[in-house]
């Protein structure tokens, strides 16, 4: 490797910390200064959405078509390096755009990690964890969703019914374009999905060939799923990350109906004495503020922060809340079904050709030129994630491990957390939200993000979280299209222009 290549590598990867600090610092202070001159927020919005991640960005986009929406996000804009897939790993664990969570020491897992602690990166910016993730577009198995329908007793969660929401967000340009039953270039779809040229993926043809020799076909992993292997499809456009910021928020920055409030950390939901959610308290640049919603508050803060916010607001296991000094309002098992995928690492294998990408050996000006011109090559890949397979087993973990090797260390993936605000039947003691995503025993409050999954999907969780956002927006729009605003004093107040929403209420019956 030439001296110039080493300098190039160091100047790109070595200066990354500086760029992270500078770009995030610029975003923060720019927003701080603009906040000094901006108009006051409206006194009341139709909907408040908390969290602009995978699900929240989709919800805010759909609801703000014809409602006044306030979107509150604790972080700022994503920074440019996050768009380059090869930086996915080095950009984790920076508190400027990552919540940097850690688990408590684990008794039975994470034995290979220091102090048995697992790191849980979570995105903190417009686009949420879709700015940190590895961009793999995987829906899971159709039976996952059929199972959700069974658990909730609501057939609308069956795969054949949620498929329309997966397709609604898609702008699909992958290798399975002919499979129009499962993929779409939808009129509403901005989520750009593409495949890499298989010859640019080191070892993938060999991996797929090996799977074939074991009897597994090459299949569309997001199609009518059967056991098989395939190269991954990525949420990317021309080799650049295309998270939910690019798909759902950037296109509506000028929309009048939505106010996107960055660096706005929501600390509590206000419930009135009838447990109706009427507003939220949040802190923006050190100033405590309150925002009111006339219709609903939708919590999409992710599987760690959604349960945390509910609990800070008194919604959670009463005994636990009392023990930490929070006054309980609604006794629900919030946070008690938190589930993550398990992962393990493969031992190194030795191959007899220089197929893998060794940055010290292979990185050069041509790598940068290739990415800049074609959007391909090493910089377009989020590390060594290029292909996967699904096999059908009784016990996925044990069989999966047997299938690959001997000595394993089981870890929490740390990135696919779900189930902490579990959806289920209202009469099931485990349930926190019903199948319409309403928090039980409250009104005007829903949760919609990866936390509501009753059972974790057999795949990655970004596409399912976006689907949950799409479906939530539809459920909410449908519900409110059947409500009428009833104002008993309308005749007196409307004419005198003293009409306020406090004097009115929503009802399914028009009077
Ligand atoms: C490193 C990493 C790699 C991953 N790789 C993949 C992958 O390749 N493919 C895949 O399918 N999945 C992947 N995932 C998982 C996937 O990205 C997540 O499951 C998905 O993004 C979760 O979406 P969400 O809407 O539930 O939450 P998030 O996207 O995390 O959004 C929550 C948002 O709420 C904001 N927020 C939180 N608390 C507050 C508050 N109090 N006030 C205001 N705002 C708040 C956060 O800042 C964040 O923006 C990965 C995740 C990580 C972290």
Image (spheres, rainbow, N blue to C red):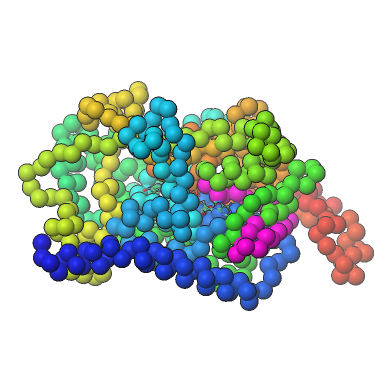
On screen, residue 190 versus residue 224, left or right, reads right
Q: Is residue 186 visible?
A: no
- Which quadrant holds residue 348? top left
Q: Locate the N terminus and report the quarter of the image it occupies.
A: bottom left
Q: Is residue 401 visible?
A: yes
Does residue 493 sit above or below 407 in this rendering? below
Front-most of residues 126 and 312: 312
| Residue at image point 12% right, 67% down | 3
Q: Is residue 276 magenta?
A: no
Q: Residue furthest left?
A: 352
Front-most of residues 474 and 390: 390
Q: Residue furthest bottom?
A: 37
Q: Residue furthest front?
A: 115
Q: Residue furthest top?
A: 394
Residue 251, percent across and down?
A: 49, 67
| Residue at image point 20% right, 67% down | 8
Does residue 100 sit above or below 17 in this rendering? above
On screen, residue 226 versus residue 33, left or right, reads left
Q: Is residue 296 magenta?
A: yes
Residue 305, percent across and down?
A: 55, 46
Task: Report the magenta residues as a range.
Answer: 282-302
Residue 355, percent across and down?
A: 12, 50
Does residue 497 sit above or below 457 in this rendering? below
| Residue at image point 60% right, 36% down | 334
- Which quadrant holds residue 4? bottom left
| Residue at image point 52% right, 73% down | 30
Q: Main secondary structure of the magenta part?
A: strand
- Which quadrant holds residue 421? top right
């Amino acid at each position: 490797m030439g001296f110039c290549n080493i300098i190039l590598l160091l100047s790109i990867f070595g200066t990354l910390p500086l760029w992270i600090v500078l770009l995030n610092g610029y975003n923060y202070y720019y927003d701080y200064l603009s906040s000094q001159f901006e108009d006051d927020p409206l006194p009341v919005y139709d909907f408040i959405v908390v969290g602009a991640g995978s699900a929240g960005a989709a919800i805010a986009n759909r609801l703000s078509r014809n409602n006044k929406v306030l979107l509150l996000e604790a972080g700022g804009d994503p920074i440019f390096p996050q768009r380059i897939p090869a930086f996915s790993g080095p950009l984790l664990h920076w508190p400027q755009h990552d919540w940097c969570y850690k688990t408590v020491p684990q008794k039975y897992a994470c034995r290979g990690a220091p102090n048995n602690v697992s790191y849980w990166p979570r995105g903190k910016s417009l686009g949420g964890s879709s700015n940190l993730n590895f961009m793999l577009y995987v829906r899971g198995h159709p039976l996952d969703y059929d199972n959700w329908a069974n658990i909730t007793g609501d057939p609308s969660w069956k795969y054949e019914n949620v498929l329309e929401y997966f397709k609604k967000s898609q702008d699909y340009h992958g290798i399975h374009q002919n499979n129009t039953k499962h993929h779409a270039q939808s009129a509403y779809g901005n989520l750009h999905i593409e495949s890499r040229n298989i010859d640019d993926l080191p070892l993938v043809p060999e991996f797929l060939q090996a799977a074939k020799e074991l009897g597994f076909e090459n299949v569309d992993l997001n199609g009518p799923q059967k056991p098989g292997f395939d190269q991954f499809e990525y949420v990317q456009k021309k080799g650049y990350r295309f998270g939910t910021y690019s798909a759902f928020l950037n296109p509506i920055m000028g929309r009048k109906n939505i106010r996107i409030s960055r660096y706005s950390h929501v600390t509590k939901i206000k419930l009135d004495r009838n447990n109706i959610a009427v507003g939220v308290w949040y802190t923006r640049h050190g100033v405590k503020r309150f925002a009111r919603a006339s219709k609903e508050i939708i919590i999409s803060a992710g599987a760690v922060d959604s349960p945390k916010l509910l609990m800070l607001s008194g919604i959670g296991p009463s005994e636990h809340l009392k023990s930490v000094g929070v006054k309980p309002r609604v006794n629900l098992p919030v946070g008690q079904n938190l589930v993550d995928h398990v992962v393990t690492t493969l031992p190194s294998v030795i191959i007899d050709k220089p197929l893998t990408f060794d940055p010290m050996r292979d990185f050069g000006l041509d790598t940068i030129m290739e990415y800049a011109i074609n959007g391909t090559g090493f910089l377009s890949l989020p590390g060594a994630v290029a292909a996967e397979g699904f096999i059908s087993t009784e016990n996925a973990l044990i069989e999966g491990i047997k299938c690959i090797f001997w000595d394993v260390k089981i870890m929490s993936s740390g990135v696919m957390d779900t189930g902490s605000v579990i959806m289920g039947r209202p009469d099931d003691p485990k349930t926190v939200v019903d199948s319409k995503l309403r928090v039980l025993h409250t009104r005007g409050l829903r949760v919609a993000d990866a936390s509501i999954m009753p059972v974790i999907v057999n795949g990655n969780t970004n596409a399912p979280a976006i689907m949950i956002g799409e479906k939530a927006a539809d459920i909410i729009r449908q519900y409110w299209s059947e409500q009428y605003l009833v104002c008993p004093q309308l005749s007196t107040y409307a004419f005198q222009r003293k009409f306020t929403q406090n004097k009115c209420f929503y009802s399914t019956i028009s009077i």
